[in-house]
């Protein structure tokens, strides 16, 4: 996604970081630490690893604030992408040096694909508009059909179906295109599959 002008907060934050303003880093951390840590934890499945990636991401931002290109999207998206790349690199290193001998490249790729799709799904759900997120929550977490979801949301049945459809369309992008020859064992769970970036 490209934009002609970044949000004012994003641009100002980048300028403050470029000037070495420590308070700016604290403000950035307060705003995005839960996003960064959550994505890292989703990829790694490990609290200590997620802590390390979180420190690495904010350290990288502090040292390279000019790396964010506002034409490529908001600062939040860049941080999520940076987190994903660092967490995947850490996962690959840990899987290749893991207990019981190194995993095969295919096993590592499969684990990275599954973790990447799950992290993208978490990010998508967290970023989608609240009405879509609420509709998906009612339908999938609470197992309500669209009629009962509509009643719970206080909207028409058509509107509930529209929200569910849009939410599912957004979530479907988490898995990315399947590569030729890729076949999951059995039906894929909601957080597995996809092609990492």
Image (cartoon, grey):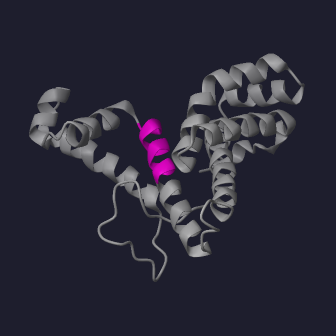
Residue 182, compared with residue 18, is above or below; it is below
Q: Nearer the viewer, residue 24 or 55?
A: 55
Whether residue 144 sits left or right of residue 18 in the image: it is: left
Q: Nearer the viewer, residue 3 or 147?
A: 147
Measured from the top left, where is residue 47 in percent x and y? 58, 37
Residue 177, compared with residue 8, is above or below; it is below
Measured from the top left, where is residue 153 in percent x and y? 20, 28
Residue 119 colored magenta? yes
Whether residue 74 sits left or right of residue 16 in the image: it is: left
Measured from the top left, where is residue 131 in percent x and y? 32, 32
Which residue is painted at 59% across and 51% down in the image?
1
Residue 35: in sight, yes or no? Answer: yes
Measured from the top left, where is residue 116 in percent x and y? 53, 55
Stretch in magenta = 118-128
Which residue is painted at 44% across and 57% down in the image?
173
Which residue is painted at 73% across and 20% down in the image?
26
Count of marks placed on residues:
0
Q: Nearer the viewer, residue 9 or 179?
A: 179
Residue at the right extreme, as displayed: 19
Residue at the bottom extreme, as displayed: 181
Whether residue 36 sits left or right of residue 191 in the image: it is: right
**What's the magenta bit mostly, secondary-structure-wise?**
helix
Which quadrant of the view contains residue 79? top right
Residue 5: in sight, yes or no? Answer: no
Which quadrant of the view contains residue 163? top left
Residue at the top extreme, as displayed: 23
Residue 28 colored magenta? no
Which residue is painted at 47% across and 38% down in the image?
127
Which quadrant of the view contains residue 103? bottom right
């Amino acid at each position: 996604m490209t934009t002609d002008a970044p949000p004012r907060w994003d641009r100002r934050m980048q300028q403050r970081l470029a000037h070495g303003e420590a308070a700016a880093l604290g403000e950035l951390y307060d705003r995005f630490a839960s996003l960064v840590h959550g994505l890292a934890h989703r990829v790694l499945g490990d609290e200590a690893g997620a802590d390390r990636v979180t420190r690495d991401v904010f350290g990288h931002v502090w040292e390279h604030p000019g790396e964010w290109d506002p034409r490529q999207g908001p600062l939040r998206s860049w941080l999520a992408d940076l987190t994903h790349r660092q967490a995947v690199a850490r996962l690959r290193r840990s899987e290749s040096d893991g207990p019981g001998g190194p995993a095969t490249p295919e096993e590592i790729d499969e684990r990275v694909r599954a973790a990447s799709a799950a992290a993208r799904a978490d990010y998508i759900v967290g970023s989608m508009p609240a009405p879509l997120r609420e509709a998906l929550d009612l339908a999938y977490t609470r197992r309500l059909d669209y009629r009962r979801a509509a009643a719970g949301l206080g909207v028409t049945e058509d509107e509930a179906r529209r929200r569910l459809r849009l939410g599912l369309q957004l979530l479907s992008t988490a898995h990315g295109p399947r590569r030729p020859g890729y076949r999951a064992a059995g039906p894929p769970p909601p957080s597995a599959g996809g092609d990492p970036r």
